[in-house]
Image (tube, rainbow, N blue to C red):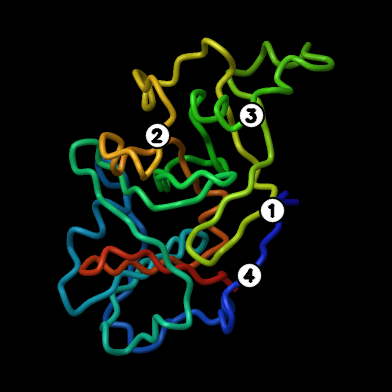
Amino acid sequence: MKKLFLVLISCGLSLGQTVYSAEISCSSLFDAEGDMLVALQREIGENELLQIDIDSEEVCTLERSSVDLKAQTSTAFHVNSELSELAIAANVEGLDTWLRVDSGYREFMLLDRVTSESLGLTDAEFLGDNSLLEASDFFIEYVSIELGALKLRSVETNIPHLEVPYDHYAGRGEMLTTSNPESEFLTVGTIGEALLEDFIITLDTVNKRMYMTEAE
């Protein structure tokens, strides 16, 4: 059972309505070099939207005029070509920041060590029986995040143990926030497949918005 609690706060927000109508073409997801979402969004024209169902392993190209995006919650996204990652604006435990969307990461979420320490998420790391911790590089905390009007509670989150290297976030010396110009679009964690498969994702590459509706 997934330890995830979903709260909707946007008036009139309907997450049960997916938008499969007027599709141009659909195909199976593929293994691309780098992140799959980064590769897919490169092929979309100005009058098209990209709709991805991670759980069903299907991707569809839709006509922009055929989809009512006002009924869906959304958040800003940015593609970092150098790192081959798609970053989305998020609020993690009250911190406005960016999270990497990684369809190849099998867990729910990961946060880097520096950010986790700054948010007080590592306080309980060495409390109680730690005999099982030696077998893993990560420990689990349950974290609240917001993606636009979408609030997710108790998201199972992997946090690296003290002094455990994690290459993707190596060299980050301080907590990154969206208010820091030097950290613009740099991610402090990863949203993975276990969370993404609960949603239908629609990418608007012109306006750099990622829309999410609950998968049926």
Disc 3 and disc 4: Cα gap in Å? 26 Å
Disc 1 and disc 4: Cα gap in Å? 13 Å
The tag on residue 120 is 3
- Report the amino acid beneath label 3: Gly
> Along the polypeptide, which appears first: circle 3 or circle 4?
4
> Along the polypeptide, which appears first: circle 2 or circle 4?
4
Q: Secondary structure at mark 3?
A: loop
Circles 2 and 3 in contact, beta carbons < 8 Å = no
Q: Residue at x 48, y 71 (%)?
A: 73
Q: Nearer the viewer, residue 26 or 128?
A: 128
> Along the polypeptide, which appears first: circle 2 or circle 1?
1
Circles 2 and 4 in contact, beta carbons < 8 Å = no
The mark lying in front, picked from 2 and 1, is 2
Q: Quadrant of residue 187?
A: top left
The tag on residue 176 is 2
Disc 2 and disc 3: Cα gap in Å? 15 Å
The mark lying in front, picked from 3 and 4, is 3
The tag on residue 199 is none
Q: Residue at x 37, y 22 (%)?
A: 172
> Along the polypeptide, which appears first: circle 3 or circle 1?
1
Task: Please name the residue that numbered disc 4 is placed on.
Answer: 8
The mark lying in front, picked from 3 and 1, is 3
Q: Residues within 10 Å of mark 4 (few under 14, many from 20)?
A: some
Q: x, y percentage for residue 43?
A: 17, 63
Q: Quadrant of residue 201?
A: bottom left
- Report the amino acid beneath label 1: Leu
Relative to 194, is 107 above or below?
Answer: above
